[in-house]
Amino acid sequence: IPCLQHIKRKFIDCGENDPDAKRIVELINTLYQNEHKHKVGVDGWTVEQNLMHRKKYAPDILGEIKDVFDEIEERGDLLPKSELQEAITYLRKEWNAVVDI
């Protein structure tokens, strides 16, 4: 999942005390945990099986990530130059590529 690591880093940089950023990092970690349950080429696991597996677990988690960042934006309490606002702006910019995994 190529661009998620850059997105995750932006939210990590917000600090562990930011519950919104922490929640998004946890959800991205859940994506990674699911992705690493199987490895293509190990025990006969194929690229096709990996893609089917990803299509099963990823949409729900990605939907939850979107719900979280939409909720944060709807609150309207972030300063424009805050780290969290910058992380959300970056995530929104990359969102189409993220959901196209």
Image (cartoon, rainbow, N blue to C red):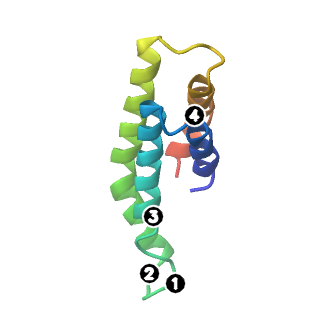
Nearer to us of marks 1 and 3 is 3
Q: Is residue 56 above or below residue 69?
A: below
Q: At which x and y percent is residue 17?
A: 47, 34
Nearer to us of marks 4 and 1 is 4
| Nearer-N-terminus badge (1/3) | 3
| Quadrant of residue 19 within the rendered picture | top left
Q: At which x and y percent is residue 76?
A: 47, 11
- Name the residue beneath numbered marker 2: 45
Mark 2 vs mark 4, CA separation in Å: 37 Å
Amino acid type at image mark 2: Trp
Q: Residues within 10 Å of mark 2 (few under 14, many from 20)?
A: few
- Name the residue beneath numbered marker 4: 14
Mark 2 vs mark 3, CA separation in Å: 13 Å
- Name the residue beneath numbered marker 3: 35
Secondary structure state at the residue bearing disc 3: helix
Q: Nearer the viewer, residue 55 or 24?
A: 24
Mark 1 vs mark 3, CA separation in Å: 14 Å
Secondary structure state at the residue bearing disc 4: loop
Amino acid type at image mark 1: Gly
In the visual, does 57 lie left or right of 36? left
Mark 4 vs mark 3, CA separation in Å: 25 Å
Q: At which x and y percent is residue 66?
A: 42, 33
